[in-house]
Image (spheres, helix red, strand yellow):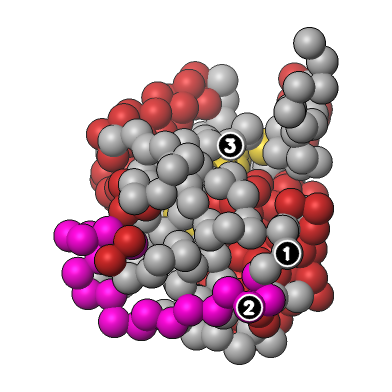
Amino acid sequence: MSGSGTRSVPHGLLPSDTTLDVRSRAAGVPRQVAVLPVGSFEQHGPYLPLATDTLVACAIAREIADAYPVHLLPPVTVSCSHEHAGWPGTVSISSVTLHAVIRDMAASLRRSGVEALVLVNGHGGNYVLGNVVQESSARGESMALFPAAEDWEEARERAGVRTSLLTDMHAGEIETSILLHTHPEMVRPGYESADFIADDRRRLLTVGMSAYTDSGVIGRPSLGAAEKGKELLAALTDSFGAYFELLTSASVPAEGVRRAAGSDPE
């Protein structure tokens, strides 16, 4: 029966490339780069959808694909959201499974001639992605994790986001702004009065999100605005340029790529 509670796929969630598009785009770069949005399916309070992190990752990846000759992949939509298990609707897979999925996809891409993979992570709880990049780089495979915390901080300042990255932890100003810009029809009323602050979350991994918030929100969504979302995406797209140059530069030795791609200070 048609129309029984289903909705169309939001614009930009699935790529529309043909194999000819991929081949033509690759002709202009010394190394092919694929971009994989990694989201989640977890609670984002009562006003943002469970797919928020996937929508955010896809929005970033789509902007990147519009600006750089990269191969845009469909998103990973379920990941490691175990800290949100206290809310109905949240679905998780193990970190081992996510690790294996990324490795399998990277290997498949290499077999088809795509040498570098960028993971565009939309969910902060996907800690294992950093390990995937570390291990892949050590094996001599070109992989990067984007955006880094510094990329988000630069984007936050450029967009005029008032909430710090510490405070803007979940379903706050940044995520609300991006969805107000890209998918305003998916933002429900109520975010304007849903602010909740919990900056001290040192036992989060032990007790989960439900120990810190009843609503599922930690941040200041009331400050969300579509214009901020637009500027956040523009700033992140600009930041990606350094990653793209690194991964595609024929003059950079492979060892240099392995050391720099996706590496964060320890």
Instruction: Give the structural element (helix, strand or loop) at label 1.
Output: loop
Among numbered discs 3 and 1, the one appearing first in the sequence: 3
* Residue 192 shown in magenta: yes
Query: Dividing the image into 4 quarters, which one contains the N terminus?
Result: top right
* Bounds of the magenta segment: 191-209
Q: Position of residue 177 (x, y in %)?
A: 70, 69
Q: Residues within 10 Å of mark 2 (few under 14, many from 20)?
A: few
Q: Can residue 127 be seen from the camera position used here?
A: no
Question: Which residue position holds label 3?
Answer: 75
- The picture quadrant where one finds residue 261 is bottom left
Q: Residues within 10 Å of mark 3 (few under 14, many from 20)?
A: many
Question: Which residue position holds label 2?
Answer: 193
Question: Which residue position holds label 1?
Answer: 189
Among numbered discs 3 and 2, the one appearing first in the sequence: 3
In the picture, measured across the screen, residue 118 lies left or right of residue 20, that is left
- Residue 160's disc number: none
Marks 3 and 1 in Cβ contact (< 8 Å): no
- The picture quadrant where one finds residue 180 is bottom right
Q: Position of residue 214 (x, y in %)?
A: 40, 66
Residue at image coords 50%, 85%? 164
Marks 3 and 2 in Cβ contact (< 8 Å): no
Instruction: Give the structural element (helix, strand or loop) at label 3.
Output: loop
- For the residue pair 7 and 249, the one nearer the viewer reads as 7
Instruction: Give the structural element (helix, strand or loop) at label 2.
Output: helix
- The picture quadrant where one finds residue 225 is bottom right
